[in-house]
Amino acid sequence: IGAGLSSATFTATVASLTSDQTAVLTSTLNGSSQTFTLTGSAPAQLSSVACAPSTLSSNASSTCTVTLSKAAISAATVTLSSNDGLLTVPANVTVTSGQSSATFSATSGSVSSTQNATVTATLSGISKQSVISLAAALQPSSLTCSPAIVNTPGTSLCTVTLTGAASSPLTVTLSSNNTSVSVPASITVSTGTNNATFTVTAAVTSDQAALLTATLNGA
């Protein structure tokens, strides 16, 4: 402190922080001290990215949310990517000033086989990920009837089995290539199950064969 002056100034430099911290500054003269607490505020960091629903079928979308550790002091641009070409995300999403989160959509294409896609969000070198399961549309895996040979007039009990359990009621279309062997127009596979049964009625006057077909999602 120069002669004739009662004060002096100096600069305290805060290094790059990844979390909010405090520092106690102390000045001492002739054995007497004064302190001041300086707070260093770290920029907002990316803490998570989450998507719901986490399972998508073909041509569906999920709402994803990027969350920061605290409200952004200024607009923060979060870079986005997907490791699977069947799941599309925007190139980035912006968390506006004063906010701590932002949303974007992840959209699936035509899914022919079940697989996982990883969405990655990156801000200031920190990356977070969220996994979205891409589920192929259910298809009939088998159609069986018992008995396979019917003494007419008579009936046979048939079962349609799908490649997986239905997440909602599914309508399976039925057909027969023989007009003397009749089937219902359709049957419903209930939620949580992978099969359904129906009755075939045969009324023929000579030995004949009939080809029965079960169709779901075009297959």
Image (spheres, rainbow, N blue to C red):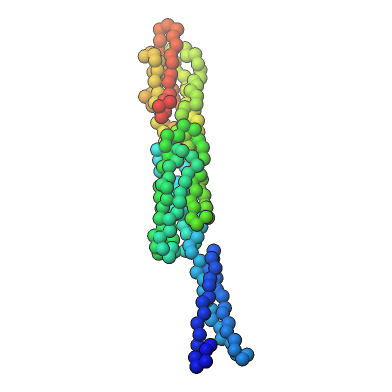
Q: Nearer the viewer, residue 117 or 12?
A: 12
How far from the left and from the top, in percent, is residue 166?
Answer: 46, 36
x and y percentages locating residue 49 in the rendered image: 48, 52
Residue 193 visible within the image: no
- Residue at the (45%, 54%) spot, across then down: 78
Task: Identify which residue, 152 or 108, lies in the foreground.
Answer: 108
Q: Residue at x 59, y 86 (%)?
A: 28
Residue 21 horizontal/vertical position (percent): 55, 70
Q: Nearer the viewer, residue 175 or 78?
A: 78
Q: Is residue 103 above or below residue 136?
A: below
Relative to 30, say whether 55 is above or below: above
Is the residue 218 above or below the residue 92 in the image? above
Q: Please, is residue 45 above or below residue 12 in the view?
A: above
Task: Write the residue at 50% across / 60% down.
Answer: 45
Q: Residue furthest top?
A: 206
* Rendered residue at 50%/30% (across/down): 163
Left or right relative to 218: residue 35: right
**Residue 214 visible here:** yes
Q: Is residue 63 left or right of residue 26?
A: left
Q: Position of residue 38 (x, y in %)?
A: 52, 76
| 152 left or right of 2 in image | left
Q: Farthest residue in the front direction?
A: 3
Quarter of the image for the C terminus: give it. top left
* Name of the residue lying farthest toward the bottom: 4
Residue toward you, 191 or 132? 132
Please state the total of marks drawn on the protein image. 0
